[in-house]
Image: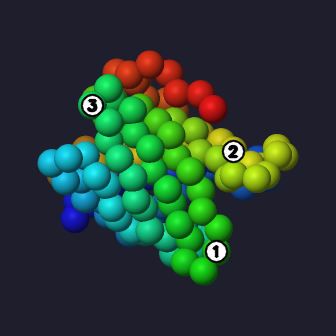
Amino acid sequence: MMKWSGWWEQTGYGRQEMHNLSLDVDVDGMVKGQGEDCVGRFTFRGQFWPDGTVSLVKQYLCRHAVYYEGCNSREGIFGRWFIRGLRAAYDSGRFALCPVAIGLANCEAIEELVPVCEAVSR
């Protein structure tokens, strides 16, 4: 599995970094991985699509699932996350995921990635 860096933003929590994040993408675009953040440990499952869009499900262990929809860019993935069934100010927000390469900064400083696919909205 490859090391990644990532963050998500939520009203009331601000920007939260993901730790020990690793993702593996197979030749068919299937994604699996794991990590942890201030909510707890989680797994990632999903798909990189040929048009540059990415759909992921972040499943917290023994807790809720969070859905990530984004676009692949030259720096990583940028998009929006949401929790199904919630309709409040805290049910969605932005995220960024970036592969970690030697000599490159992680994506904490990235405010917004330039997508190569069409904008994702929900």
Q: Disc 1 marks which residue?
A: 63
Contact? badges 2 and 1 (CB < 8 Å): no
Q: Residue at x 49, y 56 (%)?
A: 57
For residue 73, side relative to residue 103 (left or right): right
Q: Earlier in the sequence, mark 1 or mark 3?
A: 3
Q: Which residue is mark 3?
A: 50
Q: Earlier in the sequence, mark 2 or mark 3?
A: 3
Residue depicted at 25% across the width and 59% down the height:
24
Q: Locate residue 48 relative to residue 16 in the image: left or right.
A: left
Q: Residues within 10 Å of mark 1 (few under 14, many from 20)?
A: few
| Comes first in the chain, label 2 or label 1 | 1
Residue 98, image x and y in percent? 35, 45
Q: CA distance from mark 2 to mark 1?
A: 17 Å
Position of the N terminus by quadrant:
bottom left
In this view of the protein, which residue sits in the foreground, 37 or 51? Answer: 51
Give the foreground label among 2 and 3: 3
Q: Quadrant of residue 34?
A: bottom left
Vertical placement of residue 55 versus 20, above or below: above
Q: Residue at x 65, y 47 (%)?
A: 82
Q: Where does the C terminus fall, quadrant-wise?
A: top right
Residue type marked 1? Arg
Residue at 28 percent across and 52 percent down: it is: 30
Q: Position of residue 32 (x, y in %)?
A: 33, 61
The image quadrant of residue 66 is bottom right
**Mark 2: few/some/many CA within 10 Å (<14, 14-19, 20+):** many
| Dot 2 amino acid type | Ser
Q: Residues within 10 Å of mark 3 (few under 14, many from 20)?
A: few
Kind of element beneath mark 2: strand
* Residue 23 percent location from the top left of the image: 30, 59
Q: Return the residue at label 2.
A: 92
Secondary structure type for disc 3: loop
- Residue 108 location (% of width, % of height): 46, 46
